[in-house]
């Protein structure tokens, strides 16, 4: 099962607030998506494809090709949640970049951070793992601006010693880069990366708060664990139903066992293009097929195994799964 790419909707809300003064409405920014100001209150994360649509809407509404630079300039590290707080409270610059490398999937799961030491250079290489089409440069510029904020926060001065290498063609608005970045920018590079003198790699962070760092780091760990659970929630449902066949669990009961509301469980399964009923049918159909093929258990007894009080209901379910009755299936399927 592939990981569903999602991003925090706080980025969208930040864009809405920032552009409201420029006459761009929330409706323009959210046009063509399933997002509303109301449902964003209920869902902390939104699918990547909808986020891309938001970015393209923003670009079209503002008619500003450098919108990524503008939005990136507004991305204070705290906008990046616990990852940002951990980064700006890291003991050293390299520790801050390691935070992005380890926990980027929490906030930007389509970007892979790879710190490299080569010769006298400390290189922060970024790789985009998703095809973002026309929104590509907007994401690149915004994330580079965010990194510049973090680096300069720790250095305590503009990163004039750095070099910015971008693996894209020179855009028409390249002159705008000088208004936002504090170092030379080179296009048509082999990789997307920030190059710093190696001497800056272990720069101590004078603003680091050890207690805040540990607190933010723990939040990163917990969020990463929860994210992994969310990604695998359909597998968890499948496994639990498989080992509790006779309990005839409802989605409300299962959600309670998973420490979430049934509404949340329904939403998470929908994000993975499945549902509780579909998984339950898959589990029961597979198990019923196995019993009928490899055992002599009666159909009436089998209905009890699956928690059916009425064998007739089990027969109806079975016919829905396979198009034939349990007896017909048993005679049709060869035993090995």
Image (spheres, grey):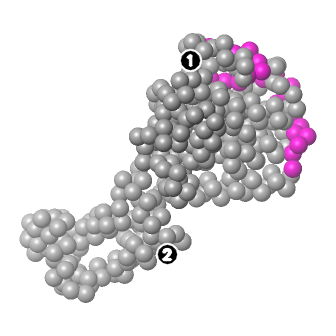
Rounded to the nearest angstrom, the CA distance separating label 1 from label 2 is: 49 Å
Residue with the mark numbered 1: 168
> Predominant secondary structure in magenta?
loop
Contact, CB < 8 Å: mark 1 with mark 2?
no
In the displayed structure, does residue 229 sit left or right of residue 222?
left
- Where residue 323 sits: x, y (%)? 12, 65
Q: Is residue 225 visible?
A: yes
Of the pair 35 and 112, the residue shown nearer to us: 35
Q: Looking at the picture, does residue 43 appear above or below residue 131?
A: below
Residue at horizontal 70%, vertical 31%?
73
Q: Quadrant of residue 17?
A: top right
Give the SS element for disc 2.
helix
Q: Residues within 10 Å of mark 2 (few under 14, many from 20)?
A: few
Q: Looking at the picture, does residue 275 appear above or below residue 185?
A: below
Residue at horizontal 50%, vertical 48%?
46
Residue at horizontal 47%, vertical 48%?
35
Q: Tell whether position 207 is magenta.
A: yes
Residue with the mark numbered 2: 256
Read off the magenta span: 181-209
- Where residue 300 sits: x, y (%)? 18, 85
Q: Quadrant of residue 139?
A: top right
Q: Which residue reaches farthest bottom?
A: 309
Name the quadrant of the C terminus: bottom left
- Where residue 291 sits: x, y (%)? 23, 73
Of the pair 93 and 50, the residue shown nearer to us: 50
Q: Residues within 10 Å of mark 1 (few under 14, many from 20)?
A: some
Give the SS element for disc 1.
loop
């Amino acid at each position: 099962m592939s990981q569903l790419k999602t991003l925090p909707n706080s980025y969208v809300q930040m864009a809405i607030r920032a552009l409201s003064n420029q006459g761009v409405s929330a409706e323009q920014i959210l046009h063509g998506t399933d997002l509303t100001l109301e449902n964003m209150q209920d869902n902390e994360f939104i699918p990547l494809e909808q986020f891309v649509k938001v970015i393209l809407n923003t670009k079209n509404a503002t008619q500003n090709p450098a919108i990524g630079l503008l939005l990136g300039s507004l991305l204070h590290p705290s906008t990046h949640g616990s990852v940002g707080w951990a980064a700006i409270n890291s003991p050293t610059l390299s520790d801050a970049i390691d935070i992005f490398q380890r926990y980027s999937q929490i906030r930007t799961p389509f970007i892979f951070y790879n710190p490299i030491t080569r010769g006298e250079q400390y290189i922060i290489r970024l790789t985009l793992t998703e095809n973002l089409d026309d929104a590509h440069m907007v994401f690149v510029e915004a994330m580079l601006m965010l990194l510049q904020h973090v680096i300069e926060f720790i250095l305590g001065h503009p990163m004039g010693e750095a070099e910015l290498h971008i693996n894209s063609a020179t855009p028409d608005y390249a002159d705008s880069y000088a208004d936002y970045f504090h170092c030379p920018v080179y296009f048509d590079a082999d990789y997307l990366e920030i190059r710093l003198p190696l001497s800056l790699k272990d720069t101590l962070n004078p603003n680091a708060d050890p207690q805040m760092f540990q607190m933010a780091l723990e939040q990163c760990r917990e969020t990463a664990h929860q994210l992994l659970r969310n990604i695998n929630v359909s597998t968890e449902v499948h496994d639990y139903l498989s080992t509790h066949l006779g309990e005839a669990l409802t989605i409300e009961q299962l959600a309670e066992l998973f420490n979430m509301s049934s509404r949340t469980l329904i939403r998470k399964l929908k994000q993975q293009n499945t549902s509780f009923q579909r998984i339950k049918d898959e589990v029961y159909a597979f198990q019923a097929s196995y019993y009928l093929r490899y055992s002599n258990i009666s159909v009436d007894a089998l209905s009890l195994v699956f928690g059916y009080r009425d064998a007739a209901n089990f027969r109806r379910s079975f016919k829905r799964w396979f198009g034939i009755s349990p007896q017909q299936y048993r005679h049709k399927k060869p035993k090995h």
